[in-house]
Amino acid sequence: MIILEFWLGYNNFSERLQLPVNPPEFSVKVGQKNSVVDVTDVGELNLIGGRKLAQLTIQSHFPALWRPYCAYRNILQPWDAVGVIERWRNIGKPIRLVVTGVGLSFPCAIEDFEYGEKGGSRDIHYTLSLREYRLIRIQQVGESGRPDERSLITEMAINQGDSLLEVAHRVYGDCDEWKRLLTEFRPNIPSDDGKASSRDPDSIPDPFELDAGEWEVA
């Protein structure tokens, strides 16, 4: 029997929220950005474009009291759960949706979040609309005019307090690739003495906190 769990996570799941009540149904909307053109003496042609961003809408509720249909016992109070999602939305960074049991996992942005109480039960019913978030990568072009085999980001903005783990997850999709950042980019990493930053992985201080600025390809 497949057991579904719906999770929302922020900052590489250092913050996470499991939905206490699974939605009765859900569907993922995907598509292609195709174009239909009319060619003389040929007729209509369908030109297949790139894929569109996936979309998912979740409708459920945050119960005020635990009930047997809840996914777990130690549920948050409804307004506390709402506060978690609202805080993530206001930060303006992507979160990650994970649905266990079906292999569904992708970074996404909160498009809409509608919530409110009904019927005096103090439960909060909500509709959460999510849209896939994709990191933009820029291909470098060599002297021959052909794209470089490596697809790299030529410059990337870093916010104060970002960690190497978080940035590695944004760039490579895997936080364990943080050491790779030190060889491919010039990060602004604070040293213990406040002097020139080091790119030696063994000398990076915990918790891998970075100075704000921009990284360029090394």
Image (spheres, helix red, strand yellow):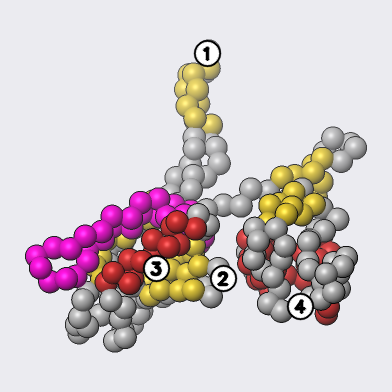
Is residue 147 rendered magenta in the image?
no
Q: Residue at x 49, y 35 (%)?
A: 34
Residue positioned most to the top? 40
| Magenta stretch in the rendered image | 104-132
Relative to 163, residue 150 above or below: above
Determine which quarter of the picture holds residue 176.
bottom right
Task: Identify the mark at residue 84; answer none if there is no mark.
Answer: 3
Q: Secondary structure at mark 2?
A: loop
Mark 1 sits on what residue? 41
Determine which quarter of the picture holds residue 202.
bottom right
Chief SS of the magenta region: strand
Q: Residue at x 49, y 37 (%)?
A: 33
Residue 2 at x, y percent in the picture? 36, 79
Badge 3: residue crowd in 10 Å (few <14, some 14–19, many ≥20): few
Q: Nearer the viewer, mark 3 or mark 2?
A: 3
Mark 2 sits on what residue? 12
Q: Amino acid at mark 1?
A: Asp
Can residue 141 be seen in the rendering of this structure?
yes
Image quarter hosting the N terminus: bottom left
In the visual, does 68 lie left or right of 185? left
Residue positioned most to the front? 194
Q: Secondary structure at mark 3?
A: helix
- Give how far apart the Cα atoms at labels 2 and 1 are: 54 Å
Asked if disc 4 and disc 3 are in contact, CB closer than 8 Å, the reply is no
Q: Nearer the viewer, mark 3 or mark 1?
A: 3
In the visual, does 217 lie left or right of 175? right
- Give how far apart the Cα atoms at labels 3 and 2 are: 15 Å
Task: Identify the mark at residue 205; answer none if there is no mark.
Answer: 4
Q: Earlier in the sequence, mark 4 or mark 3?
A: 3
